[in-house]
Amino acid sequence: MINAPSNLSLVRIKPKKIRITAYKLLSVKVPIRVETTGSLPAGLILKEKVAAPDSITVLAPRKLHKSKIIIRTEPIDLSKITKSVTLEPKVIFPPDIRFKNGQIPPVRVTIEVEQKPMNPK
């Protein structure tokens, strides 16, 4: 006999035996790491790179220790940055991580740049 939640209907099981692994998910707040590649064009310096929010709450299996969960952005190519900009890169996360309501929260990254000061002669 199979016990199923009231909102689930079992139509058929094939093969007759299956192995299911289930685990409880814990709510964990983890920081977001902003990933970059390349270098800024000549004449610019990176003032700051900030993710908003700077951390997000994920659902993780108990076996994953909080310090081992890395949430990062898709790499942002600094060589294409010519002025301060805010982007919404894709969020990259481990396969065992889930998000509340199945929705990956949007993350905005602000890359603030400024002109290098000119060296007086």
Image (cartoon, rainbow, N blue to C red):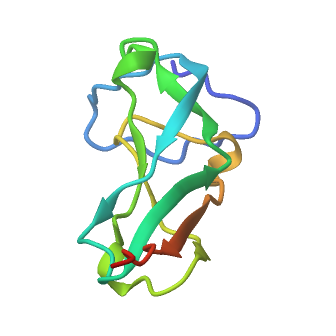
Measured as percent of width and height from the top left, residue 85 is found at: 59, 77
Left or right side of 36 for 1: right
Taking depth in this image into account, of 118 and 12 the one nearest to the observer is: 118
Taking depth in this image into account, of 8 and 72 the one nearest to the observer is: 72
In the rendered image, the vertical position of residue 8 relative to residue 43, given as above or below: above
Q: Residue at x 70, y 46 (%)?
A: 101
Q: Which residue in the rendered view is the most extreme toward the front?
A: 121
Q: Residue at x 39, y 77 (%)?
A: 120
In the rendered image, the vertical position of residue 85 relative to residue 68, given as above or below: below
Q: Residue at x 75, y 40 (%)?
A: 7
Residue 73, quarter of picture: bottom left
In the rendered image, the quadrant that contains the C terminus is: bottom left
Measured as percent of width and height from the top left, residue 52 is found at: 67, 52
Measured as percent of width and height from the top left, residue 34 is found at: 44, 52
Left or right side of 41 for 115: right
Taking depth in this image into account, of 88 and 99 the one nearest to the observer is: 88
Q: Which residue in the rendered view is the most extreme toward the right?
A: 6
